[in-house]
């Protein structure tokens, strides 16, 4: 109903439901403390969101899906969105930039929400003015791949992550936000075991301070093993 706050967000898959003949573009809304963190980190045009969620293995029996008993759930990357534009709904000057198709997003109607913001996705992935991948600025990873899984395989704890080595930095101030403590990081061959925040959202890092991040992302998009 109209007064419910639950909504599809980020809205980055055009074919999730029938949109009729209406114009559409990928969108992601944020507000409150989560947006406050993004604003503090100066997140804006050109920056990239990588979305992760909670997943579990299922089996299909007589047309119904059920979680597989004994299989632990895990965190996994499922999509990305490079920012083309940002609209702050608490700024009257920016409201004038809202296009008609953007008004379909529920954050447009969150009257009174603090720091209410809408991020608009980009079509092509562009880094430092160079085209990295066409039609890959926003999208989802359609199938499971080992390199998308964040939770260490076989671990009984969701936030026991195994991540690429480029995420680590000897300068703790350059580590991803909420993880700027070296005690959370332990090298394991060519990766790092990370004790991720138990309720995690908006972990921010600067690709310029983490060489290899963009190459890793390119391979992730192309489905190459890493």
Image (spheres, rainbow, N blue to C red):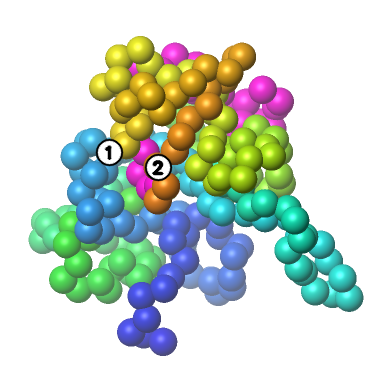
Q: Secondary structure at mark 1?
A: loop
Q: Nearer the viewer, residue 86 or 203?
A: 203
Asked if residue 225 shows in the view, the reply is yes
What quarter of the picture does the N terminus occupy?
Answer: bottom left
Residue 222, magenta (yes or no): yes
For the view shown, which residue lies furthest in the right direction? 62
Crowding near the residue tagged with mark 2, few <14, some 14–19, many ≥20 C-alpha atoms within 10 Å: some
Q: Tell me the residue at 31%/62% (across/down).
A: 99
Q: Tell me where residue 117 appears, x and y as whole percent.
A: 25, 56
Q: Secondary structure at mark 2?
A: loop
- Residue annotated with mark 2: 197
The residues colored magenta run: 200-226
Left or right of residue 184: residue 91:
left
Q: Is residue 159 above or below residue 68?
A: above
Q: Tell me where residue 126 appears, x and y as whole percent.
A: 45, 29
Q: Which mark is residue 211?
A: none
- Say which of marks 1 and 2 sits in front: 2
Left or right of residue 225: residue 195:
left
Left or right of residue 138: residue 105:
left
Tags 1 and 2 touching, CB below 8 Å: no
For the view shown, which residue lies furthest in the left direction? 92
Q: Tell me where residue 192 appears, x and y as whole percent.
A: 52, 22
Q: Tell me the residue at 67%/55% (across/down).
A: 56
Q: Tell me the residue at 25%/71% (across/down).
A: 110
Q: Is residue 200 above or below residue 29?
A: above
Q: Nearer the viewer, residue 97 or 72?
A: 72
- Residue annotated with mark 1: 43
């Amino acid at each position: 109903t109209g007064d419910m706050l639950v909504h599809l967000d980020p809205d980055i898959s055009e074919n999730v439901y029938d949109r009729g003949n209406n114009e559409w573009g990928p969108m992601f809304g944020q507000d409150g403390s989560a947006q406050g963190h993004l604003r503090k980190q100066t997140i804006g045009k050109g920056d990239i969101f990588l979305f992760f969620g909670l997943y579990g293995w299922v089996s299909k029996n007589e047309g119904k899906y059920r979680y597989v008993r004994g299989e632990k759930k895990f965190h996994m990357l499922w999509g990305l969105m490079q920012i083309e534009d940002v609209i702050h709904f608490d700024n009257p000057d920016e409201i004038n930039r809202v296009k008609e198709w953007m008004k379909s997003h529920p954050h447009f109607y969150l009257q009174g929400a603090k720091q209410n913001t809408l991020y608009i996705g980009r079509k092509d992935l562009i880094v430092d003015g160079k085209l990295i991948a066409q039609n890959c600025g926003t999208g989802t990873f359609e199938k499971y791949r080992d390199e998308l899984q964040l939770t260490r395989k076989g671990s009984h704890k969701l936030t026991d992550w195994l991540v690429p080595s480029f995420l680590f930095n000897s300068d703790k101030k350059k580590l991803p936000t909420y993880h700027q403590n070296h005690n959370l990081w332990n090298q394991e061959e060519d990766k790092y075991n990370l004790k991720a925040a138990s309720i995690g959202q908006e972990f921010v890092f600067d690709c310029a301070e983490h060489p290899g991040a963009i190459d890793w992302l390119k391979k992730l998009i192309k489905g190459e093993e890493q």
